[in-house]
């Protein structure tokens, strides 16, 4: 096989088409500018008053896809990664860009340390029943 043929097979998958490396989608970045911490279960919600992402020439097709998916229904970071068939790290960077551009916002889950202890709730219910 010639060097040219080897190069083509390295960057082209017959079933999937041309291969785009994840770092190309994020322009080499591994974090977004504002360093948003996104858990896998953090929920991404499209901003209702946001401009049309397709009109913004700085956004990639993947950015637009994320906004479109979140307009249909809020999506977790893990769901977006699975739906777009992209690595979690890439999706986190893209979501960070969209948060910075005010196209989406992220609802983070309540940390376990801040959750109310179930035994306290049972004690309150039992106390109310005793009244």
Image (cartoon, rainbow, N blue to C red):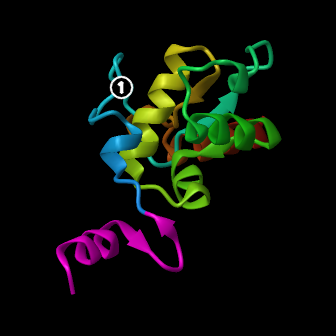
Residue 57 in the magenta stretch? The answer is no
Q: Is residue 41 left or right of residue 71?
A: left
- Estimate how packed mark 1 is, as few (under 14), some (14 to 19) or many (20 or more) residues with alpha carbons within 10 Å: some
> Magenta residues, as a range?
1-18
- In the rendered image, residue 79, in percent from the top left (x then y), is placed at 59, 55
Instruction: Tell me the residue that label 1 is attached to.
Output: 32
Query: Residue drawn at (74%, 38%), measured in percent from left and top?
Result: 68
Q: Is residue 91 left or right of residue 107?
A: left
The answer to whether any part of residue 29 appears in the image is yes
Q: Circle 1 sits in a helix, a strand or a loop, which is it?
A: loop
Query: Residue drawn at (34%, 53%), measured in percent from left and top?
Result: 21
Q: How many marks?
A: 1
The answer to whether any part of residue 111 appears in the image is no
- In the rendered image, residue 101, in percent from the top left (x then y), is placed at 56, 14
State which quadrant residue 71 falls in. Answer: top right
Q: Is residue 60 left or right of residue 104?
A: left
In-front residue for pair 34/14: 14
Image quarter of the C terminus: top right
């Amino acid at each position: 096989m010639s060097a040219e043929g080897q190069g083509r097979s390295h960057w082209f998958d017959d079933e999937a088409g041309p291969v785009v490396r994840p770092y190309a989608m994020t322009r080499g970045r591994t974090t977004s500018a504002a360093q948003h911490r996104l858990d896998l279960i953090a929920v991404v919600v499209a901003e209702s008053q946001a401009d049309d992402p397709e009109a913004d020439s700085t956004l990639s097709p993947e950015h637009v896809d994320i906004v479109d998916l979140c307009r249909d229904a809020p999506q977790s970071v893990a769901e977006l990664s699975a739906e777009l068939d992209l690595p979690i790290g890439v999706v986190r960077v893209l979501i960070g860009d969209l948060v910075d551009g005010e196209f989406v916002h992220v609802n983070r889950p309540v940390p376990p340390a801040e959750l109310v202890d179930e035994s306290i709730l049972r004690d309150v219910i039992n106390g109310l029943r005793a009244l």
